[in-house]
Image: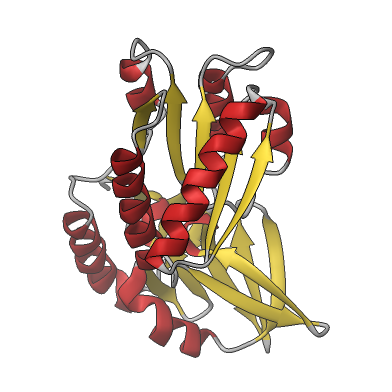
Amino acid sequence: MLAVAICDDAILDCCSLEREIKDILEDMGVPYTIKQFHQGEDLLKAVEGFDIIFLDIMMRGLDGMRTARLLRKSSFDRMIVFVSSSRKFVMEAFEVEAFHYLTKPVDRLKLENTLKRACSKSERSLEEFIIISKDRQNKKIWLKDIFYFEVRGRIVYVHSRNGIFDYYGQIGELERNLSSRGFFRCHKSFLINLSCVDTYDHEAVTLDNGEKIVIAKRRYEAFGSKFLDHVKENGGHGKCRQRLQ
């Protein structure tokens, strides 16, 4: 299921783009949902859950570029496609990590290629979340938003950017499922997200949110090795600093 949002204060343009997207996705056999917005402010209030946003730039009130910056500031990391009658904003689009930039009138072939790439990227992200259950309710939590898991007795606490959630579970099962997806068990009670590591030494890891998580002495070398592998796999030298003693 591809969840699409279109934000354009020109209602006719918004409806026309929606028809084109529907036609293309139906030809591709891709299930979808589409919702229209005509103000950046309205989009910001309802952004959670969309995979891709088609965003007009020159809108009244909150324009598309400022809307995109606010989306990124709020940790929205899904795909943004700018749609504009002008190409003068292309360089600014790079600053907010735009997925693509389309000019009006939108070329159908370019739109189709954009949607194919978006579907491919979305499919690769399908397993990038966990679902926890509590009180007969299920909640989806994106892995990228999780700083670490903590276990106390039979309760697992998920420390995330959106708060702390708890449920009955086993940290050993989490370790088996998530060790290949960028998580490392640095202590019997903690499973941390390696992407959130800021600094570390022989005693503790400091995460992006400033919290310090203890490293068991016998796990320190394995942690260092795992962290370096994680950095290499993600194409960089990493932002983490090892504190020297």
Q: Nearer the viewer, residue 137 or 221?
A: 137
Residue under the point 57% across and 28% down? 13
Q: Nearer the viewer, residue 135 or 63?
A: 63
Q: Residue furthest right?
A: 135
Query: Taking 168 as reference, is 161 left or right?
Result: left
Residue under the point 48% across and 48% down? 21
Where in the figure is residue 150, as x and y percent of width and height? Answer: 58, 72
User: Which of the 4 image quarters holds residue 3?
Assistant: bottom right
Q: Nearer the viewer, residue 175 or 204?
A: 175
Is there any visible trace of residue 208 in the rendered image? no
Residue under the point 66% across and 40% down? 36
User: Which of the 4 image quarters holds residue 105?
Assistant: top left
229 w.r.t. 93: above or below = below
Q: Nearer the viewer, residue 43 or 83?
A: 83
Query: Taking 193 as reference, is 76 left or right?
Result: right
Where in the figure is residue 177, as x and y percent of width and height? Answer: 41, 83
The image's colour scheme reads secondary structure
110 w.r.t. 218: above or below = above
Where in the figure is residue 28, as x and y percent of width and height? Answer: 38, 64
Residue under the point 44% across and 29% down? 82
Where in the figure is residue 65, as x and y percent of width and height? Answer: 51, 20
Is there any visible trace of residue 172 in the rendered image? yes
Q: How many marks?
A: 0
60 w.r.t. 95: above or below = above
Query: Taking 114 as reference, is 78 left or right?
Result: right
